[in-house]
Amino acid sequence: MPKPILNLLVLRTANLDASLVFYKCLGLEFVEEQHGTGSFHYACEIGGTVIEMFPGKPGTAPDRRTAGATVLGFQVTNIDELVETLQNSGSIVLTSAQESSYGRRAVVQDPDGRAIELNQLA
């Protein structure tokens, strides 16, 4: 049986504007969408996967080490510059950029508290 392919990731956010700024810093370009009479949202495609961002009720994502938490990971070209850009835009850095067996790695938080792992291959 062939393995499934991830083709959709939906993020709910309490602050669309702040989330759009955060993910734009990562290099994602979201466009406005609305399908028929469905909810207004933003979408982008990365590596064959559609990422959609919908308005959500205020809340906080579970701690990244807690069951039910989701951590998103992105491979980036200049992790130090990106982490600095994110810090300057008000993002929380959970783990500063450091060398690991996977290359240079950092973990930041998106505006809703989701952990976002950044990796820069050596």
Image (cartoon, rainbow, N blue to C red):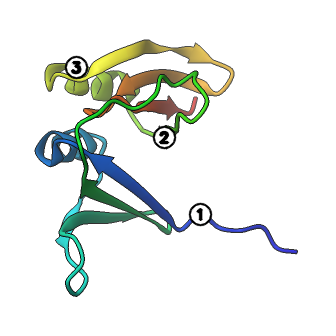
Task: Give the farthest residue toward the left.
Answer: 17
Query: Nearer the viewer's eye, disc 3 or disc 2?
Result: 2
Residue pictured at 18% horizontal, 69% vertical: 40
Q: Are marks 3 and 1 in contact (CB under 8 Å)?
A: no
Ranked by sequence position, the earlier of labels 3 and 1 is 1
Callout 3: SS: helix
> Which labelled disc corresponds to residue 6?
1
Residue 58 is situated, as x and y percent measured from the top left of the image, at 23, 37
Real-space CA distance between mark 2 and mark 1, rounded to the nearest whole angstrom: 13 Å
**Residue bearing mark 3:** 87
Assess disc 3: are there few (<14), some (14-19) or many (≥20) residues with their C-alpha within 10 Å of its C-alpha.
Answer: few
Q: Nearer the viewer, residue 81 or 12?
A: 12
Q: Quadrant of residue 44?
A: bottom left
Task: Give the farthest residue toward the bottom.
Answer: 36
Callout 2: SS: strand
- 57 is higher (above) or lower (below) than 36: above
Residue pictured at 50% horizontal, 69% vertical: 48
- Direction from residue 74 to residue 51 in the image, left or right: left
- Direction from residue 3 to residue 40 in the image, left or right: left
- 54 is higher (above) or lower (below) than 121: below
Ranked by sequence position, the earlier of labels 3 and 2 is 2
Query: Nearer the viewer's eye, disc 3 or disc 1?
Result: 1
Callout 1: SS: loop
Q: Nearer the viewer, residue 25 or 71?
A: 71
Q: Are marks 2 and 1 in contact (CB under 8 Å)?
A: no
Specify the amino acid type for callout 3: Gln
Could you tell me which quadrant the N terminus lies in? bottom right
Residue 113 is situated, as x and y percent measured from the top left of the image, at 34, 28
> Which labelled disc corresponds to residue 72?
2
